[in-house]
Image: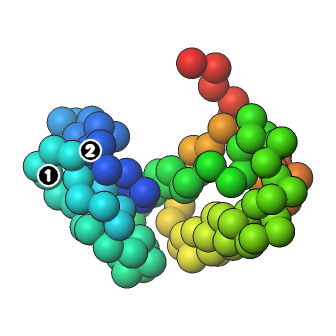
Amino acid sequence: MRVLIGCETSGKVRDAFLARGHEAMSCDLLPTDVPGPHYQGDVFDVIDYPWDIAIFHPECTHLSVSGARHFEAKKADGRQQAAVSFFMRLVRRSEHISGRCFENPVSIMSSMWRKPTQIIQP
């Protein structure tokens, strides 16, 4: 399978798929922490490739309910709207990928987009 790991620098998820024989690539604006197939740049540059699976880890700093006390300031300066917009752009642009998931903690996306289909307690 061809696997895209979006918004990942650690290489851990990418390397787990590689170890199982899949074609996998991580992607982030930052460089990867460990050598391996990694696109350093905008995930939207590579999202249209015919991926079989995509796992996205969009930034949650401005979305997570654990930081709800800061929401007013984040709304006022546009940080929260930008984070929601990025998340929803990932959703729309990845619709052609049959297996996709969006990893995020409990966040406002449950009410702005949809409830999670899976919750994992570490």
Asked whether the viewer can see residue 68, the reply is: yes
> How far separated are the C-alphas under marks 2 and 1?
7 Å
Quarter in which the C terminus is drawn:
top right
Q: Nearer the viewer, residue 101 or 45?
A: 45
State the residue at coordinates (26%, 68%): 40
Residue position marked by numbered label 2 in the rendering: 11
- Spot occupied by residue 69 in the image (x, y as percentages of width and height): 83, 42
Mark 2 residue element: loop
The answer to the question of whether label 2 and label 1 lie on touching residues, with beta carbons closer than 8 A, is yes
Q: Residue furthest top?
A: 122
Q: On residue 76, which mark appears?
A: none
Horizontal side of residue 100 vs 107, given as left or right: left
Q: Residue furthest left?
A: 35
Quarter in which the N terminus is drawn:
bottom left
Amino acid carrying label 2: it is Gly
Give the quadrant of residue 105. top right
- Spot occupied by residue 57 in the image (x, y as percentages of width and height): 50, 50
Amino acid carrying label 1: it is Gly
Horizontal side of residue 8 vs 17, given as left or right: right
Mark 1 residue element: loop
Horizontal side of residue 89 vs 75, given as left or right: left
Horizontal side of residue 109 vs 93, given as left or right: right
Q: Is residue 58 above or below residue 21?
A: below
- Spot occupied by residue 113 in the image (x, y as percentages of width and height): 81, 59
- Spot occupied by residue 101 in the image (x, y as percentages of width and height): 57, 50
Q: Nearer the viewer, residue 110 or 31?
A: 31
Residue position marked by numbered label 1 in the rendering: 36
State the residue at coordinates (23%, 40%): 15
State the residue at coordinates (67%, 71%): 82
Asked whether the viewer can see residue 23, the reply is: no
